Amino acid sequence: MWWMLVLAAAVGEIYTAVKLAYYGELWGRARGGEPTAWMAAAAALPLWGAALCAGWSRRADLALGGVGGALLLWAAAGGCALLAALETAFSWGEVSGRRVLCLLGGCGAVVLLPAFGMDIPLGPVRALTPVLLLLGGVELTYRRELRRPPARALADGPLRGPRLWWRVGVLAVAAFLGGLFLCCGLSHLLGEGAASPLWAALFLGAPLSAPAAVCWGKLVRRGESARLAPFLLRLGWMGLLALPLSDLACRGESVYRFDASALLLWLLCLYALAALFWCLRLLRRRERSGAVLLTCRILCVCLPLCALLFFWLGLRRG
């Protein structure tokens, strides 16, 4: 199974290089300078290190007690943190609180999913499907955020010079510590046999709630409390995702007994509910065409049934 880790790290390296080259070029043109595509190669070094570590030690079980598994997880967390910080800062030269929350959530998911999925005796497609779904959701969020003005929840203005790199460094350290915190939570569950789902929910939710609290404090102080709704909604989705994860992870003696197909069904349930809310938003806009409104009405009937079906199947698989 070690070759799957090498393949996943190589795909992540290519994804990182393409994204950072794209945003680096946009940032360089906006600043009137040369594109900064060389930063993509620098950001991809941790992922290449993870691939070499996996191929050298062949610790495909990702045992956190061993040096190989710990270095692999830390390298993945560092690579995701650097990607999150650079991509956030280079988008429009400003830091958006929504992007920070989404990126930290994606970082935690990327750190968690290999530990849950790689050791399960499933085919590569079934094991990597949840990872691809999460990457697709994060990518869709990026594209939506880039079409609208940034929320500017963490920055007072454009970041330039030393202030830009200071903020990038702070975000990288915060995301990296969040990944390490998740690793510590997994090692606690592995070592002591999962005392209760409360501990797992704490380990899954604490790295995501800390930046949310900072963003909320900034918004309340500026009198923009109306913007709290998106943060609360996103935190609610994270909580819904953390509950089945923590419950299923705490049932067995080891988190490696986690059922990847149950996770996929829970994710499909969440995506069905998200699509339902999107259809309800479209129904409120009267300027849409009749075909779109009819399709939305049909989906408003079908999507709740699909969500209930996925929820029931996930409970049976879990």
Image (tube, rainbow, N blue to C red):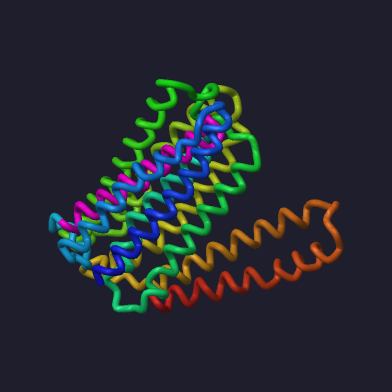
Question: Does residue 46 appear to the left or right of 167 in the view shown?
Answer: left
Q: For residue 248: magenta?
A: no
Which residue is pictured at 60% across the width and 73% down the height?
A: 306
Q: Position of residue 208 (x, y in %)?
A: 40, 44
Question: Does residue 75 appear to the left or right of 283 in the view shown?
Answer: left
Where 294 falls versus 89 (above or below)? below
- The answer, for residue 1, to whether it is visible in the render is yes
Q: Position of residue 282 (x, y in %)?
A: 75, 55
Which residue is pictured at 40% across the width and 68% down the height?
A: 128
Q: For residue 78: magenta?
A: yes
Q: Position of residue 94 (x, y in %)?
A: 53, 30
Q: Quadrant of residue 86?
A: top left
Q: Position of residue 198 (x, y in %)?
A: 31, 54
Q: Count all numbered tags in the image, as a single digit.
A: 0
Which residue is pictured at 35% across the width and 51% down the height?
A: 204
- The answer, for residue 246, to whether it is visible in the render is no
Question: Does residue 28 appear to the left or right of 46 in the view shown?
Answer: right
Considering every residue shown, the one lying at the far left of the view is 66
Which residue is pictured at 64% across the width and 69% down the height?
A: 303
Part of the protein shown in magenta: 68-95
Quarter of the C terminus within the rendering: bottom left
- Prevalent SS, magenta region: helix
Q: Which residue is more in the foreground, 261 or 226?
A: 261
Quarter of the N terminus within the rendering: bottom left
Where 250 falls versus 17 (above or below)? below
